[in-house]
Structures are given as C-alpha cells and as structure tokens.
Image (tube, rainbow, N blue to C red):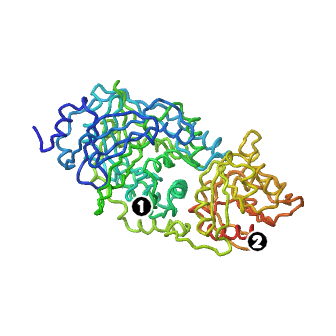
Amino acid sequence: MPTAHPLLDRVLADPTGLSWALLWREEGTEVELLVGEVQDIGLLADIPEATAGRPVLALVPFRQVTERGFDAHDDGTPLRVLVAAATERIPVDLLRDILPSAAVEVTDERFSVSDEEYAEIVTSVIEDEIGNGEGANFVIRRDVIAQTDTDPATAALTWLRTLLTDERGTYWTFAVHTPGHTLVGATPERHVSVRDGRVRMNPISGTFRHPGEAELEPAFRRFIVDTKETEELFMVVDEEMKMMAQICSHGGRITGPYLKQMAHLTHTEYLLDGRADSDPRDVLRQTMFAPTVTGSPMENACTVIRRHEPAGRGYYSGVLALLEREEPGRDGVVGRESLDAPILIRAAHLDDAGTVTISAGATLVRHSDPVSEVAETTAKASGMLAALGLRPRREVRDTPTLVELPGVRDALEARNDSLAAFWLSPQEARPDPLLVGTEVLVVDAEDMWTQMLAHQVRHFGMVARVLRWDQVAEADVAGAELVLFGPGPGDPDDPDDARLARLRELIGVRLGAGLPLLAVCLSHQVLARMAGLEVTKLARPNQGVQLEVDLWGTPARLGFYNTFVARPGPAVLESAGEQVELEVAADVEHGVVALRGPGVATIQGHAESVLSRDGLVTLHSLIRHTLAGRS
C-alpha cells in the first residue's frame, strides 16, 4: 500500500535497484532517507560538497587511515560516497511499522578467531606491546561471520526494523545499501561532528554487560567504581583531547562523565567540545580514527593492529560521514557545511555473496584479563546478533534506567575530582609576562601529546610550533628560544629505532649550544640515559595511572604513561662544553620522575594529561626554570 512518502515507496518496491541510506539520529522523531548516486573516491579531500537539500554520505573504511601515514592492511574497501539526488523524512514509528518483518535466515555462524586464539592475542598484546612501551591501550577485533540467501538490501531493511524496535541509547541507527557493500547497525558513539564552527567528540569506554535482573544493580555499582573501567575511559579521553588540541584553536573542554545505556550493554562517556574554522574534511582526516576502536598512541596503535589482526577491517571502526549544507543566515550568505560522523561499530556488513560480518573489539590495557576480554567481544556483538535472530532479543523495558539508581550520578561526578581543572573549564589565556612571545619548538616523537603541550604553552602566551622528529633540522633546534622534546612510544634503548637516534642527536645539539630545553616522558628517558642513568622496564607499566610525586619539595599529582623508568643515581650532562650535575627527583617505587639543572628540565609524567591535576602548574614551573638564566 502506498504511503505519503513516495521516495520510501520507491525504495521498498525495489530495494536492490537503488543506492539509499536510512538514518535515525540521536533522539530524533524522524528517519532521513537519502537516495542517489554512488562514487568511489581516493581521498577524504575528494568528498563532494553538499548543497542545499542535497547531503552527501561518505562510507569511510579503516584503511583510509593511511592518509595520515599510519599502518593498515589494504583490503580494498572503497571510500564510497552517496550523493543524494532526493531526500525524504519519515516518522520513525511509521517506518518501523512498514519495514519488512519476515524472518531472514542466517546460517553458518562462526568467529573468525576462536576464544582460545583471541585470549592468546590479548596476552601477547599485554606482554609484548604494552609491556614493552608500545602504548597504553590497544583495540584488537575479531569477527562473527555468517551467511544469508536473502538479498542484502532486504536483509538490512528487516534488521533495521528490529534495531529501531529493540535498541536504545544509540547515536545513529542506520541502514545503507550500495552495490557490493551494505551496512546496518546501531552505533552508540559519535566520532566527530562539526556545526557552525563547533566541534564535538564523544569518547565512549568502559563496558558493563547487563546480567540477569537479580544481579543487575549490585553488578552495576561495582562497575561504576571499577578502577580498570575508569582508567580505560580516561585514557581514551586523553587521546581524543590530543586531536581536539590540534584542530580547535582554543583546545577542547571536557564535560561528563555520562552513561550510554543500550539494550545489552552500558558504557561511560565524556563530551569534548571546542571551536574550529577548518573544512569538515580536514577535521575528519585529522581525527582518523577514534582511540576507542584503535588505542593510543594512535600511530603506534595502527601498527599494533596490523601486527595482530590477520586481515583488514573493512568499514569496521571507520565512520559514516554525513555532510550537509547549513541554512543560509539572514544576510543571505551561503551556509557552512556541517559534519556528523558516527563510528562504524555494532554494525553488520553484507556483500553480494551473502556473507554477513559483525566485528567487535576489546580495549586491552595493562591489567586486562584475557577471559574477560573474550567475553567483551562476544557481548559487543550481541545486540547486532539479536537483530539477526541469532541471540535472544531484549526489549527496552527489560532493563531499568541505570543512571537513576541512587548514588550513581554522584559516583560519576566523583570521577572528575582528581582531574585537571584546565581541561574541565573554558581555557582562557592567562599569559605570564615573563613568557609572552617566547618561541617554543615542540618535537613530536610520534605521539600527539605534543598538541596538548603546545596548547598549554600557548595558554602562557608563548608561541608554539610542532614538528615531527624526522622533519626537525639542527638549525630548527639551535634557533628556537626553547625546545620541548615530546613523548612517544618504545624502548629508549632500542638500538634499531632511528627516531631515538635522532632524538639523541637533537638533544645533543641543544645541550652543546647550552640552550634551554625541556624533555617529557620518552625524551626524559633519552636524556636520563645521556646523563648516565640506568633505564629499566617497570615490573608493572604505569599506563594511564595517576601518581602523586614529590618534585623537590612540591607535591604534584600527575598522569603517567610509561613502561620504562630511569633509576636514581648521579646524573651528569655535558652542556656548552662543561659538566653539569642534575638534581634528581625520585620515587622509591617509580624511579626518577624529574631532572633539572641550568637551562634543563625533564619530567616523566604527562603534565598535559587530563589525569594531571597539577599539570599546568608543574609545566609552568619547569618552563620558568629552563628559561631562568636567559638575558
């Protein structure tokens, strides 16, 4: 029977003959239908411009991360755009009632990696990657694979009906059909949005798997105060704040935490908010991809994923990116393009051969339990598997609203008590007259912490320039008023790492000239070795932990992300041809946490981290120390 929505009637009459997308967005009462032509393009910069009433939807695969120079399996999944020729809005209740409802038979369900194999991968990542300083956390995925004889478009419409009925707490619920690639899912997580110059990101981490009714409340109360789940969320917030500091002129502000409750799972999340004038395509490129589905630091996380996942990710952990043209202002000026890009998780991919793939990953941290991480991947796939009829369905009314339980809001708010106020409030510039105009070269050692450091030194009125280690010339190092050598992954004694060799050379140039420098984390360890200190591996890595340390009589609570540590002892550097003895600040358990001498300061912790309650004051003090002797 025809409806009052002729475009929808066309799709339902011939779902396989058209390219289309049905998009329900957070808290909306309508579903957007886009019908148009498909193009495969090479780069995000090639995404066509949206025009008034004609949005553009891009399907961005994970392999597109190579645009940033990061590693990925090249599985050939296309960067595909659907340029809308026509659009329509349909009330969600109406759509739910008229979508296909006949059961879609799905057979041959299996995991691409068995439980036992996945547990072995978890152990390997903890011991060989996190345990050797390659990063703080990594997300490794496995796939549920199955088959169906139903055509992909009809299957997607059928499963969309179930998701619109059963699921809750989603950011987007969607179905997209194009030749050879059909997607359907209910993702909880916004990756990035841009509207009227306002950039938002929503890192989600920490996963509560809903148990039976009797166990629900006590189990959730344990989850909300669980150290692992809390630290896991803070780590991804730190990683996304690196992106915000790069793309937003005044950094980003953190609000939350909040709960994201779905039918089978509940997550914790923060909202990151800032302003930028960049083209949405540039914002998208600079934020590929979310640390919640990759890990941190981002560049090394992509390398670790390629090492431990046997094949490409397809569209999993990429994004759907909807570009729209905002309404013109009163002055008639053409409206800006807006961007809304959810992460492609909790989704099924169908190809023309009838293969159905549902991918799910677990965030692996220093104290991950392999058995629990196996269960997490299974739980994350459960919502989509229920929509396919392969798991029991759970209706929304089956689970109470967890945030309304007594004490839950207070427990969430208490997470912020020890965080850096700098990132939790508007970051208005507070220039130090002694530092205003000072030029700082920030050397990036393959970790975008440097973007947060640059943002903080600009807060003092300094002028910061960030260069990657392999782009820094000796003249750059010799000519800057201050050089800040940044953090990075890896073993500081690795003889085969060209990056470390270059850091030693550049630090040597700076010391040889007797010019002020500050070194953070990995660079602190490199300088400590140059000063004659032993650097060893910690028995238990400090990845995403907050420690209170004594910095020469001043207590400071800082965030630490280190697997290696310098051990206390006499520390002597050659600076401008003279032997200079450094003061050592050391902790019994955590080794050397800082060094200082004339024109030199180092810190093992991350003053720029959201975990560093005293980070801004500490960074300011260290910079003032290094520059104290200048004329």
Q: Quadrant of the C terminus?
A: bottom right
Q: Residues within 10 Å of mark 2 (few under 14, many from 20)?
A: few
Can you tell which quarter of the image residue 585 is in?
Answer: bottom right
Q: Viewed as shown, does residue 323 lie left or right of 76?
A: left
Question: What residue is shown at x 37% (from left), y 57% (from top)?
Answer: 195
Amino acid, disc 1: Tyr
Q: Residue 336: x and y, percent?
A: 36, 54
Pick the front one: 518 or 73 = 518
- Figure check: 60 above or below 417: above
Q: Residue furthest bottom?
A: 433
Q: Residue 97: x and y, percent?
A: 17, 44
Amino acid, disc 2: Ala
Q: Viewed as shown, does residue 406 lie left or right of 6?
A: right
- Figure check: 609 above or below 553: above
Q: Viewed as shown, does residue 405 lie left or right of 75?
A: left
Q: Residue 416: x and y, percent?
A: 51, 67
Q: Quadrant of the N terminus?
A: top left
Residue 628's mark? 2
Q: Residue 616: x and y, percent?
A: 62, 68
Residue carrying label 1: 258
Pick the front one: 524 or 215 = 524
Q: CA separation, marks 1 and 2?
A: 44 Å
Foreground mark, 1 or 2? 2
Residue 542 visible at all: yes
Can you tell which quarter of the image residue 587 is in?
Answer: bottom right
Q: Viewed as shown, does residue 407 lie left or right of 491?
A: left
Of callouts 1 and 2, the N-terminal one: 1
Q: Secondary structure at mark 1?
A: strand
Pick the front one: 41 or 92 = 41
Q: Residues within 10 Å of mark 1 (few under 14, many from 20)?
A: some
Can you tell which quarter of the image residue 431 is in?
Answer: bottom right
